[in-house]
Amino acid sequence: MTEEQLTEKEKQVLDIAKNIMEENKEAFQHLAAIERKEFAEKDFEDLTREQKIQLALEEIDWIVIGGQDGQEFYGSIQFLRKVLRSLV
C-alpha cells in the first residue's frame, strides 16, 4: 500500500471515528462521567502516571468535542495544568 493510499485510509478511519463519536456523544459522556467518578474516589496523588495521562487525554477530548460553558472549560484547563505539573 502506498503512502497516499495509507493517508486516504487513515482519513476514512478518522471520519468513521468522528461519526461514531457524534452519533454516540451522550453515551460517551455518560461513560466518561462514570470513569471520572471512579477516579475521583481515588486521591489524585495515588493515581499512576498512566492514569493521570489517560484522564488528561479524556479531558482534551471533551474540550475538542465542545459544548462546555466557560466555567467547565476553565476547570478542564486547570485539571490539565494539574496533571502536567504532577508529571514533572
Image (spheres, rainbow, N blue to C red):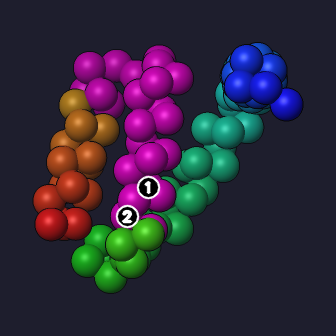
Residue 66 painted magenta = yes
Q: Where is mark 1, residue-wise?
A: 55
* Quadrant hosting residue 46: bottom left
Say which quarter of the image contains residue 42.
Answer: bottom left
The answer to the question of whether label 2 and label 1 lie on touching residues, with beta carbons closer than 8 A, is yes
Left or right for 41, reference 16: left
| Secondary structure beneath label 2 | helix
Percent coordinates x, y for residue 73 in the rendering: 30, 28
Q: Pick out the residue farthest to the front.
A: 2
Disc 1 secondary structure class = helix
Residue type at mark 1: give it: Leu
Tell me which corner region of the image, top left, top right, bottom left or bottom right, holds residue 29. top right
> From what the image shows, is residue 79 above or below residue 86?
above
Above/below status of 12 relative to 78: above
Q: Is residue 23 visible?
A: no
Could you tell me if residue 24 is visible in this image? yes
Side of 54 relative to 27 (left or right)? left
Q: In the displayed structure, would residue 42 be above or below residue 24?
A: below
Which residue of the protein is positioned furthest toward the right in this rendering? 1
**Left or right of residue 4, residue 82 in this image:** left
Q: Which mark is residue 87?
A: none
Mark 2: few, some, or many residues within 10 Å (few <14, many ≥20)?
A: many
Residue at 24% from the left image edge and 37% from the top image edge: 77
- Give the residue at x 43% y 55%: 55
Q: Magenta segment, which residues?
A: 51-73
- Residue 8 in the image: state x and y as whole percent: 76, 17
- Magenta span: predominant SS is helix
Q: Residues within 10 Å of mark 1 (few under 14, many from 20)?
A: many
Residue denoted by label 2: 52
